[in-house]
Amino acid sequence: MTTPATSASPTSMEVDRLLSEARILVCCGAGGVGKTTTAAALAVRAAEQGRSVCVLTIDPARRLAQAMGLTELDNTPRAVSGIDTAAGGRLDAMMLDMKRTFDDIVLAHADDARAKAILANPFYVSLSSSFAGTQEYMAMEKLGQLKATGKWELIVVDTPPSRSALDFLDAPQRLGRFLDGRMIRLLTAPARAGGRAYLKVFTIGVKMFTDVLNRMLGAQALKDLSLFVSSLETMFGGFRERADQTYKLLKEPGTAFVVVAVPERDALREAAYFVERLETEQMPLAGMVLNRMHTSGAAELSVERSIAAAETLNATGDEPFAAAALRVHADRLSAAIRDARRASQFHAAHPRVRMVEVAAQASDVHDLEGLRAIGADLATNPVGAA
Amino acid sequence: MKLHVVSGKGGTGKTTIAAGLALALAAGGRQVLLTEVEARQGIAQLFDTPPLPYEERRVAVARGGGEVYALAIDPEQALLEYLEQFYNLRRAGSMLKKLGAIDFATTIAPGLRDVLLTGKVMEAATRERRGGGRIYDAVVLDAPPTGRIAKFLNVNTEVAALTRMGPVRNQANSVMTLLRSARTAVHLVTVLEEMPVQETVDGIAELIATDLKPGAVIVNMVRDPLIPEDRIGDAAAGSVDTDDIARGLKVAGVEGDPATVASLAAEMSDHARRVMLERQELETLSTLDRPTYQVPYISDATELSGLQEIADRLQAAGMV
C-alpha cells in the first residue's frame, strides 16, 4: 500500500520501542476515533512481545469486548485467552465499573458505620452511578489502583468518551481544588452545627449561601447533601492524596500519552488541543496515531485522468465495469490525498509530534487477529511512507 | 414550538445535521434557535463566525426569509442567569464565585452542569409573549453524543428524586415534562458503519427505557454504489475480472500496467464489500421502526452551501 508522498514527513513513532519501555500508556482523543481499539491493539502487541500487560477499557464496543473475553463487568482484570505467550508475556483486561470503583474507595477509607451511611445516601447513589463526570475521576482512580499493585509491567488505559478529551486530565486536579475550597466547609456547616446555631458562627456570606441552597433544594435535600459531604469529609485526605498521586503518576518517566485521531477536521482539532495541553502540563507525548487513513495502490493513475477516462467510457456506454472501477479509484485516491494533506498540515503545525498511521479497515475489528493486524500496522507504518 | 434534540456518535456529523435541520426548520420565514452545550464552539466553526458568546446571535438566513439564531450555552452563565431570574441574586454571583460555589456547581458537582444546560434549553424553548427574549418556532439542540444522551436528558429525573421539594425540584420536573412530551423529539445521527449503528440501536433502547421519545434516525454521508448491481456479490467475494478492467483502460486510452489493474481490482473489491456492509447496516436500522432519513455524502458539508443542501435534503425527504 502506498500513500501519496507528503513533503517533509514527520518522524515516525517507534511503537515497538515504546511498548518495550513504557509502564503506563494513556490513549486519548475525540470520541469515535478508535481509541479503545488502538489501546487494545497496543496491549496485545506488547503482551505478545513478552511483557506483562493490563489494559483498562472504559466502554468497549460489544464485539471487541467479547474478543477480549470481557463478558462480565466485575471491575477486576481477567486474563485474555488466545494471547501468544511464547515470549513470556501475558495480557489481562478489564472494563471500568465506575460505581464499584467509587464504592471501593468509600469502603477503604471509612469505618463500617460511616461507609454504610455514605453508600445509602441518595446523593452518593446518584453521584456514583449516573452523573457524567464521575467516570473521569474513577478511570484515573482505577489506574492508580492497578499501578499500585505492581502486578504489571505495562498498563494501557483507554480514556472515557468525555465531552472534551481533556476532561480526564483535569478530573484529579479539580477534585483537589474542590477539597481545598471553602465549599466543603460551607456544605458541611449545617450538618456539623445542627439546628440554627451554625448561623452565628459563620459570616453573612455563608448564611446567604445556605439560605439560597435551602430555598432552591428544600430543607431535606440540603440536609442530605450536607450529611453526605460531611460523612465523606473523613475520606477527603485520602481522596486528595490519591488525586495528587495519580496526577504525579501521569507525569512520571515511564508514562506516555498516545493521542489518537482520524484525518477529519474535528478529530484533528481535538488532537491539536491535546498535544498543546500535554506540552503545557509537561506530560510526555509519545506520539499520534492516525486511524482510518485511506490509501491507494495505484497513485500513478491520477484522479483527473481516472475521471476523464471514466467519462470517455460512459459517453460511449462501453466497458461499464472498467468505468466504475475508474470512478472507485478516483474516489479512493481523492480520499487518500485529502487524508495525507490533513496529516501533513497537522505535522506542519506540530512538527515535533511523532506520528504513525493505520489504514482504513474494510470492517470493524472484533477479534485478536484484527487487533494483531492493527498492532503490526502501528509498528511499521510511518505517516507519509512511500 | 418544537424541541429537536440531535445526538449521534462522534464522527457521524451530528453538529452538521443539527445545523442543516435548523436551516430546514427556518425555511419559509420561521425563527429557529440552534444551541450547543459542549463548549466546543462547533456552531461558530460551521457558520464561520467568531466564537459565540452567551447570547443569541443570528448566524444564517434560511430560504424564504427565516432566521437561524445560535446560542452556545455556558453552564456558569446559565447558573448566574438562573439565580437572577428566580431569586434576584445576580449581585450575589461574584460572592458565590469567590466561595467556589459557581465552580462547584458547574464543573465539580457532576450532573449539576447537565441540569443547568437542559434548564437553559427549556427556558429558550418555552418562552412566552410577555416574558423577555426572542420567541422561536423551533429549538434545535446539538446534544451530547449517543452514548451519553439518555443520561444527559434524564439528569433532571435524578435531581427531582434528590430534592423532595423546592424550586429546583419544580424546575427539574418541568424540564422532564417538556422532554417527555410530544413537543420534544430526540433524533439520532448515524453513518452506515457497525459501531455507530450499534450505538444508535442501543441509544434508542436507552431512550425508550427512560421514557424519552426517539424521533428520527438520520443516516448521514450516504454514497450510491458505483459498481454495477450484478457485480457486487462477486467483487465482494474478491473475484474481480481484471481483463474487464484492462480492456476498459485500453479503450479509454489509459496506460495501465498489470500492477495498476490489480490495484484497481482490489479497490473495486473493497468498494463492493463496503456496499454490502452498508446495506446490512441499513437493514439493522430498518428494524428500529423509526422514520429514517438519508443524507448523501456532501464534500463541502461544512460550508454554508453544504448546510443548505442538507436542509434541502431533509425537507425533500419529509423530515421537516
Image (cartoon, rainbow, N blue to C red):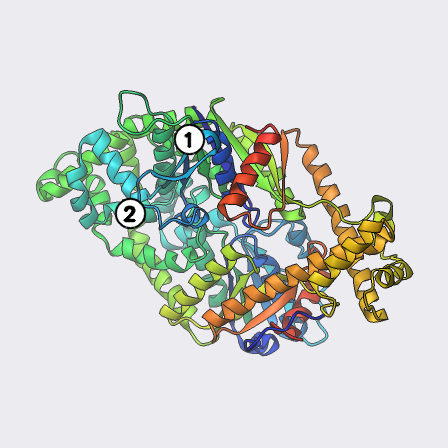
Marks 1 and 2, how far apart at CA: 21 Å
**From what the image shows, is residue B161 above or below residue B111?**
above
Q: From the top left corner, tell me how far across and down residue B49 is, in percent.
A: 38, 48
Q: Is residue A373 left or right of residue B160?
A: right
Helix, strand, or loop for circle 2? helix
**From what the image shows, is residue B105 above or below residue A16?**
above
Q: From the top left corner, tell me how far across and down residue B305 is, in percent.
A: 52, 44
- Residue ID for mark 2: B104
The image quarter in which residue A132 lies: top left
Q: Is residue B76 left or right of residue B318?
A: left
Which residue appears at 58% of the width and 77% of the height? A14
Q: Is residue B262 left or right of residue A221?
A: right
Given residues B158 and A3, the one toward you in this image is A3
Which residue appears at 70% of the width and 55% of the height? A366
- Residue ID for mark 1: B157
Given residues A29 and A55, the one toward you in this image is A29
Residue B204 in view, yes or no: no
Which residue appears at 52% of the width and 50% of the height? A97
The number of numbered badges drawn on the structure is 2
Q: From the top left corner, tell me how far across and down residue A369 is, in percent.
A: 73, 62
Disc 1 marks which amino acid? Thr
Chain identifier of the residue bearing label 1 in the image: B
**Which quadrant, please, contains the N terminus of chain B?**
top left
**Which quadrant, please, contains the C terminus of chain B?**
top right
Q: Is residue A35 left or right of residue B29?
A: right
Say whether mark 2 and mark 1 are on the same chain: yes
Q: From the top left corner, tell me how far across and down residue A276 is, in percent.
A: 41, 67
Residue A237 in view, yes or no: yes
